[in-house]
Image: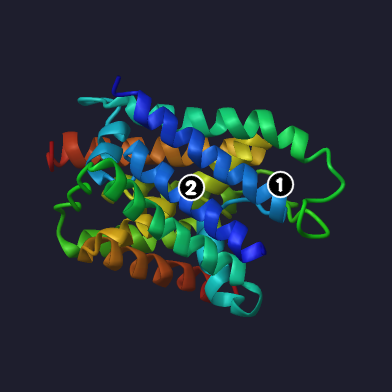
Amino acid sequence: MSYLLPLAGGILIGLAALVMLLFLGRITGISSIVWSALSDAATSAWRWAFLAGLIVGPLAFHALSGQAAPAPNPSPWWLAVMAGVLVGYGTRLGSGCTSGHGVCGLGRLSMRSLAATLTFMATGIGTVYVLRHVLGAGA
Amino acid sequence: MNALVALIAGTVFGIGLAMSGMTDTAKVQGFLDLFGTWVPDLAFVMGGAVLVTAIAFRFVLKRRAPLLVGQFHLPTARHIDGRLLTGSALFGIGWGLYGYCPGPAVAALAYLDWQPLVFVLSMLVGMGLRQITAR
């Protein structure tokens, strides 16, 4: 049963990406939406609206479901800074993240997105391995 | 109208992230802990999402145009190059270090903790760094 909510959530994410493509002709890549909302602000009303929804969504979910918001990451602040910079730099250099390459790119059967997705999954898994089983941090 | 559709889609996306557990960094890192106490739940998030897009996108992309605008805006790059792989590799390291990718990090701003805010601001710095070094 622990798979039911992740599956349902994943389907909602896919449906949202479908709506974006069908109505607005846009790929739902969050890293691109965030960056373009700032760098191309003049034509970004839809981007800001999407990002507003992205924050409203969890509020609605936790309020309606009664499920508590998850605890924030207990790591020190400098790890959030380091990880955030890597994620920002990496997603711009690599032209996308889990949503653009993963959800949408794989949906378009793009080999480029498949290569990107396999790469960030591999380094993500490798990083957690080093963090937990070499350095011995966390669980 | 475009903004309203985007607001609705963003809200559904955000509900999906919270419902699936993607805004919980402990779950995400547990999912990436393939060689430890692996928590496989989140494989179903990507699975469910790609199930929808892989089936539905092909029908949408057969249309001449989307419903509300004149044309599709699709990525045009085709080849797999060093930038794509290096960028994706660095992104994965950051994702593993903390458990947020961009969508869940923005969505988690809803929780009003300092952690997502610091992460998102740092992410913007990283994006800016790439923009500067690209010139």
Which residue is rendered at x = 63% and y = 42% of the image?
Answer: A18
Residue A114, by quadrant, is: top right
The secondary structure type at the circle numbered 1 is: helix
Tell whether A2 sits left or right of A119.
Answer: left
The secondary structure type at the circle numbered 2 is: helix
Tell whether A129 sits left or right of A52.
Answer: left
Label number found at residue B35: none
Tell whether A58 sits left or right of B6.
Answer: left
Q: Position of residue B74 (x, y in %)?
A: 73, 52
Q: Is residue A127 above or below residue A82?
A: above
What residue type is disc 1 on? Leu
Crowding around mark 1 (Cα neighbors within 10 Å: few <14, some 14 to 19, many 20+) is: many
Q: Position of residue A22 (x, y in %)?
A: 71, 46
Badge 1 is on which residue?
A22
Q: Quadrant of the C terminus of chain B?
A: bottom right
The residue sitting at the right extreme is B64
Which chain hosts label 2? Answer: B
The residue sitting at the front extreme is A64
Residue B16, by quadrant, is: top left
Which chain hosts label 1? Answer: A
Badge 2 is on which residue?
B12
| Residue sitting nearer the eye, B103 or B30 | B103
Which residue is rendered at x = 36% and y = 24% of the image?
Answer: A4
Q: How many marks on residues?
A: 2
